[in-house]
Amino acid sequence: MSQRVCVVGGGLAGCEAALVLAQWGHEVELCEMKPHKRTPAQASDRLAELVCSNSLRSDNPENAIGLLHEELRRAGSPILAAADLARVPAGDALAVDRERFSGLIEAAIAAHPRITRTAREVTRLPESLAIIATGPLTAPDLAAEISALAGEGLYFYDAIAPIVTAESIDMSIAFAASRWDKGDGADYLSCRSIVPSTRRSCRRCSTPRRSRRTTSRRRGTSRAACRSR
């Protein structure tokens, strides 16, 4: 039986949910607050925006993430299909051309007759059947509604990789290489560290430290004192 589902959030999870539901015959409203509003991590108004070309991580089926990729492919995941089409060399990682990847997802959403895209911020949980896929930077009003139902245990820890433009790299000190000898040997650019303070920090980190343990008989406790060699 076909149903109408509201999917809130136009990231990877929201787009995947909308496309799969529509493929199964359901009517979908995909709500995304861009272009009217962005989170601090977003730099474009496109759907399925990745903050890093390597965000999808390893594609090696011998580890958990790569195995999940393969399972999603076999299940017909639209996100993995787009990633494979937009793939760029990166050893055994599933790195993509971010602009092409987002463009493929947007085209699939726009072309599907059972998906309606709405550009609006959702501040209250929908009364109807819905999927909330707003990610770690959910807008404050909606986050407060979710917390009221789920409690205060909503946490998300991640890091945003800095975006470095090719023209900003000094190729006189950079060199092409693989990561861990995977790929064709020239998938990544590596930049040598030449800053003296960085070298001093490396030396300090690599200098062995010796621990001298003393015992306080009166209190029956142990104290450890560390000093540099």
Image: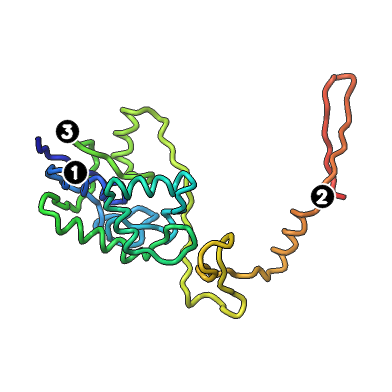
Q: Which residue is mark 2?
A: 208
| For residue 212, above or below residue 149 | below
Image quarter in which the N terminus is found: top left
Q: CA distance from mark 2 to mark 1?
A: 58 Å
Which of the marked residues, 2 or 3, is nearer the chain's N terminus?
3
Residue type at mark 2? Answer: Pro
Across and down, in percent, residue 194 comes to 68, 71
Q: Which residue is mark 3?
A: 127
Q: Secondary structure at mark 1?
A: helix
Across and down, in percent, residue 9 comes to 27, 47
Residue at the spot 77% in from the left edge and 55% down from the top edge: 204
- Dividing the picture into quadrants, the one containing residue 100 is bottom left
From the viewer's perspective, is 158 left or right of 12?
right
| For residue 16, above or below residue 4 | below
Residue at the spot 74% in from the left edge and 53% down from the top edge: 205
Q: Which residue is mark 1?
A: 21
Which of the marked residues, 1 or 3, is nearer the chain's N terminus?
1
Q: Nearer the viewer, residue 15 or 82?
A: 82
Which of the marked residues, 2 or 1, is nearer the chain's N terminus?
1
Residue at the spot 24% in from the left edge and 56% down from the top edge: 36
Residue type at mark 1? Answer: Leu
Q: CA distance from mark 1 to mark 3?
A: 19 Å
